[in-house]
Image (spheres, rainbow, N blue to C red):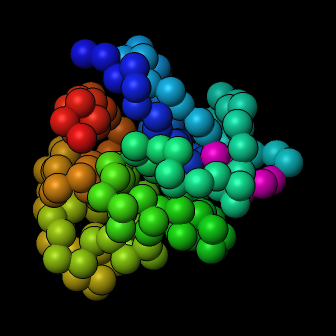
Amino acid sequence: MTLENRHAAILVEAFYKDLELWFPYHRLQKADAAITVLDAGHDTCERKHDYPVTVDGTVDEASTDEFDAVVIHGGYAPDRMRRHKPMIDFVRDMYEDDKICAAICHAGWMLDSAGAVEGRTCPSSHAIRDDMENVGADWVDQEVVRDGLLITSRISDDLPAFCQTILGASQES
């Protein structure tokens, strides 16, 4: 499976969940997709464990026109991401432009803030189930759900299915 002509943005913020950033990063890279890691413009990016990430740019300077997909990891980072309006706007624009929006674990918070889950079927971390349902998502306890170009998963254990679904959607779109 090759994604040679595809470009994915991976959003990152302080306290990111290492595995949920790196697993999709390397899976997309192995499929020959171009990857750009975007943050909110911080000088340092604290992480949940100890795997540093090099940021390629800020979401403020990025244009959604450059990307075919956005991947949002979990951990505590999505709570911080949604405090930065350009991050929310980026995800909202990707969603409204019918591009792949993939979120795992607590990343559902970003989809909530971007207005992307109302009426959609979405798993997430159990910890944010109420948040997802309160904004109108049909929350389900499944490893991955693809609802159009919205791809969501619950936890790190679901990463293989999550990434496979992203790759499949990327080939189709």
Q: Measuring from the top left, give residue 65's x and y in whole percent.
A: 50, 51
Asked if one can make out residue 135 in the rendered structure from this viewpoint, the answer is: yes
Q: Residue at x 46, y 20 (%)?
A: 29
Q: Measuring from the top left, give residue 62's x and y in whole percent.
A: 64, 52
Q: Nearer the viewer, residue 128 or 63?
A: 63
Residue range (magenta): 38-42
Q: Measuring from the top left, give residue 44's x and y in whole percent.
A: 82, 46
Figure check: 17 above or below 29 = below
Asked if one can make out residue 152 in the rendered structure from this viewpoint, the answer is: no
- Taking the image as shown, residue 157 lies to the left or right of residue 17, namely left
Q: Is residue 41 magenta?
A: yes
Q: Residue at x 72, y 31 (%)?
A: 54
Q: Nearer the viewer, residue 85 or 22?
A: 85
Instruction: Tell me the quarter of the image containing the C terminus.
Output: top left
- Taking the image as shown, residue 3 lies to the left or right of residue 148, namely right
Instruction: Tell me the quarter of the image containing the N terminus.
Output: top left
Residue lying at the far right in this picture: please name it. 43
Figure check: 59 above or below 120 = above
**Dominant SS type (magenta):** loop
Count of numbered marks: 0
Q: Is residue 136 magenta?
A: no
Q: Residue at x 17, y 56 (%)?
A: 148
